[in-house]
Amino acid sequence: MTVTGEAKLAGVMGWPIRHSRSPLIHGHWLERYNIDGAYIPFAVKPENVVAAFRALPKLGFSGTNVTLPHKLTAFQIVDVRDAAAEAIGAVNTVVVRPDGSLHGTNTDAPGLLAHLRASAPGWDAAAAPVMVLGAGGSTRAAIFALLGAGVPEVRLSNRTRAKAEALADAFGHKVKIIDWFERSNALASCGLLVNTTSLGMTGQPALDIVLEDLPGGAVVYDIVYSPLETPLLATARARGNQGIDGLGMLLHQATSGFEAWFGVKPVVDEKLRDVILANLT
Ligand code: ATR
């Protein structure tokens, strides 16, 4: 692919950055849609990140993704934040506006929802409570997405209860705290279980939960994507529940940034999934 002097430019800022899959995702789409553009990994130390953000419009960049540990700094430094960024308290996508100002959003919530709707079209947000495990940054994104989709109740359980309480305070009365030791018992009547903890990830213990009370029609969504088949998903599928892995969220969360920077709404398909999978293993 040729990059001309008129190429549109974007990238991903993090420290370290070499593990980021975003250049692969965006690079795949740039090629697929034959776009005159480039997506660059930026390894930016924390002490340089403010200057790096401010340099984006000066260098003619259309924007950037933001990954660890810069999502909070991005939140603080952008000129405008949307509702998702405000609710989640972190910015993972920055778009440079024509006047040079920086617009910050968080695409994890729409990414999760788009992936969920594409994978489980029969899931009815309004029909039943949702159980969410965890209380980190991705938990905030999940709760924001689910409440926005119209779920009647979020049952939130986290090992450290105080962190779950802080989220319940932020998101309001639809979020009900479940003690960590009660997590298995609270699955009755749920239409969806979402794991946003790091449990089940390579190198971490499995999530310890008994699915006996989870209705057979419920969907189980694991935000973990390495490995793709976590012990939670294996158990869920073995008893007939639909299981969805976290890779789709990583892919779907990238679409809105790509569209804003390069002007094409990209498709998440098996081909893209295969490209990323080949790189994960
Ligand atoms: P994020 O990447 O979403 O920001 P994080 O802040 O790293 O996530 O949080 C990881 C989540 O996994 C937390 O909810 C954490 O629980 P605590 O808040 O109690 O730390 C959860 N987690 C990690 N290891 C765990 C374990 N061994 N048992 C239970 N929960 C665990």
Image (cartoon, rainbow, N blue to C red):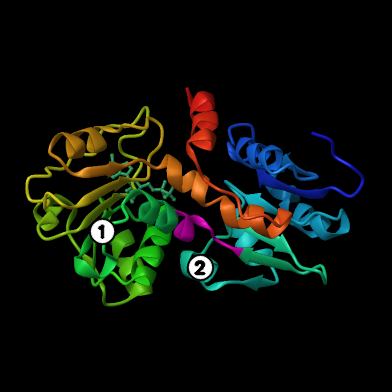
Inspect the image, locate mark 1, and give the three-letter code of the amino acid beneath it.
Arg
The quadrant in which the N terminus is found is top right
Cα–Cα span, label 2 and label 1:
24 Å
Residue 226 is situated, as x and y percent measured from the top left of the image, at 41, 32
Left or right of 17 in this view: 244: left
SS state under label 1: helix
Q: In which image quadrant can residue 154 be found?
A: bottom left
For the residue pair 85 and 212, the one nearer the viewer reads as 212
Q: Which mark is residue 151?
A: none
Q: Which residue is mark 2?
A: 84
The crowd level at tag 2 (other Cα within 10 Å; few <14, some 14-19, many 20+) is many
Of all residues, the one furthest to the front in this rendering is 33
| Residue 106 falls inside the magenta stretch | yes
Q: Which residue is mark 1?
A: 161
Is any atom of residue 52 visible in this view?
A: yes
In this view, 58 is above or below 168: above
| Residue 259 falls inside the magenta stretch | no
Q: Which span of residues is magenta-colored?
A: 105-111
- CB at mark 1 closer than 8 A to ligand 1? no
For the residue pair 180 and 232, the one nearer the viewer reads as 232
Left or right of 257 in this view: 3: right
Q: In which image quadrant can residue 91 be found?
A: bottom right
